[in-house]
Image: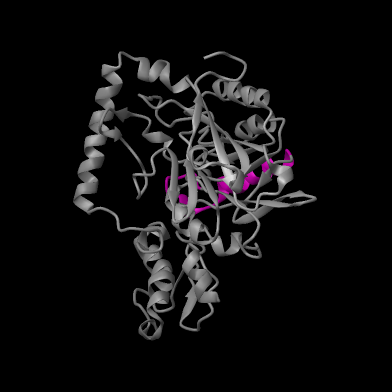
């Protein structure tokens, strides 16, 4: 069981005498061989699956200073593209992004980042209690409060969400941008929401550096401030919405790059018959969460690419599976919605408006095939006409 858990988690509770915890500040919770710089002899005696999905994650991630999920290429789905092609694409994307921003005559910077699209999506769920039919969840993602995204703009969105009056607001990460300076401001904004709020963190919510896995000082500060405001914070944890006729589970994940992402912990004890909606910032996590039985996974992270060139599509996507850029996907029997988010690190958007999504829950057996895959957009803000 310990080996199985390690296969699912960026960090694991190893139960083997050949391994010991590494007291390293650079990778505080990673587990590495107790022989520095070498794989122990016991490595070759372990089952193949354990070597791939367990020991290799901890050892290689520590020694290469990279997120654990990047080491295990089978765990998260198909293999990634070649290194050279990846770097060429990144360079071309950056050049193209700069060109588009200039050619748009300034609109891509001055107005487009603030023209929010309000999307409506039906959410069919197997086993949904009848009393939760019509329950509405509004997703907000990627606020990047303060340093890059203006607080008055975010406050306007919060007020418009309150006008929508959903039953629950789900926030899928990147409340801030690697900074404790804006923690209180971000939490104050979410504290202004009138519906119940549940939060999962993104890669910008952990360390004060770009190396997400180095610490949790920002995440811990966010969690403390959010809990003081009565907001539910889910870090590899499940939270039930209880009704007399059944339950719906909301499972919130630690960010995939944090080396704390652990479906085994988050889904522990959940029965297979009750519906589960997972909140996970990075769309690359869909493979692990689909295996655990999540019917829907709500993600952010991509910003939709921010700049979308006709035919070519999204310019910059900081993720492995670049096809998961925006919108609705079906993967291994689970549905995933990738929200473009409302904020930005760089103030520019082209053919890629910021987005707030509202999901209306339906019992799967009551939804037609055509409706199940449909997503309708209302381009105007709540209380306005399009």
**Location of residue 101 by image quarter:** top left
Q: Residue at x 64, y 22 (%)?
A: 159
Residue 283 place in picture, x, y as percent: 44, 47
Left-right relation of 313 to 255: left
Q: Nearer the viewer, residue 7 or 128?
A: 128
**Location of residue 34 by image quarter:** bottom left
Asked whether residue 239 is drawn in magenta, I would say no
Residue stretch in magenta: 207-229
Q: Residue at x 48, y 30 (%)?
A: 343
Residue 12 in the image: above or below residue 130: below
Question: From where the camera sits, is residue 342 visible?
Answer: no
Left-right relation of 195 to 326: right
Left-right relation of 178 to 78: right
Left-right relation of 139 to 95: right
Q: Nearer the viewer, residue 362 or 52?
A: 362
Residue 375 in the image: above or below residue 53: above
Q: Nearer the viewer, residue 170 or 26?
A: 170
Residue 345 place in picture, x, y as percent: 43, 32
């Amino acid at each position: 069981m310990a080996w199985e858990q390690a296969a699912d988690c960026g960090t694991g509770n190893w139960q083997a005498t050949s391994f010991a915890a590494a007291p390293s500040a650079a990778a505080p919770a990673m587990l590495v061989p107790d022989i520095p710089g070498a794989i122990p002899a016991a490595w070759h005696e372990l089952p193949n699956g354990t070597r791939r999905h367990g020991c290799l994650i901890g050892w290689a991630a520590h020694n290469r200073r990279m997120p654990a999920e990047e080491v295990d290429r089978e765990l998260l789905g198909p293999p990634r593209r070649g290194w050279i092609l990846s770097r060429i694409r990144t360079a071309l994307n950056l050049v193209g992004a700069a060109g588009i921003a200039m050619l748009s005559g300034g609109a891509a910077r001055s107005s487009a980042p603030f023209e929010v699209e309000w999307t409506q999506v039906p959410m069919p769920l197997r086993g949904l209690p009848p009393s939760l039919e019509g329950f509405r969840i509004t997703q907000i993602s990627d606020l990047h409060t303060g340093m890059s995204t203006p607080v008055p703009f975010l406050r306007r969105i919060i007020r418009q969400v309150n006008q929508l009056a959903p039953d629950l607001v789900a926030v899928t990460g990147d409340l801030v941008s690697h900074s404790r300076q804006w923690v209180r401001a971000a939490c104050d904004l979410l504290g202004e929401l009138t519906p119940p709020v549940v939060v999962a963190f993104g890669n910008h919510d952990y360390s004060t550096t770009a190396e997400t896995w180095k610490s949790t000082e920002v995440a811990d500060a966010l969690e403390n401030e959010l809990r003081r405001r009565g907001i539910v914070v889910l870090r590899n944890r499940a939270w039930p919405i209880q009704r007399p006729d059944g339950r719906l589970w909301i499972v919130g994940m630690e960010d995939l790059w944090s080396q704390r992402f652990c479906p085994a912990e988050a889904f522990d004890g959940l029965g297979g018959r009750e519906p589960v909606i997972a909140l996970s910032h990075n769309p690359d996590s869909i493979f692990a969460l689909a295996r655990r039985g999540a019917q829907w996974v709500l993600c952010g992270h991509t910003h939709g690419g921010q700049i979308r060139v006709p035919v070519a599509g999204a310019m910059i996507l900081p993720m492995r599976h670049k096809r998961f850029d925006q919108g609705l996907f079906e993967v291994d029997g689970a549905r995933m919605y990738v929200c473009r988010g409302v904020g930005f690190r760089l103030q520019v958007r082209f053919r890629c408006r910021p987005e707030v999504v509202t999901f209306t829950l339906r019992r799967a057996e009551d939804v037609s095939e055509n409706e199940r895959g449909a997503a309708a957009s209302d381009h105007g803000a709540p209380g306005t006409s399009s």
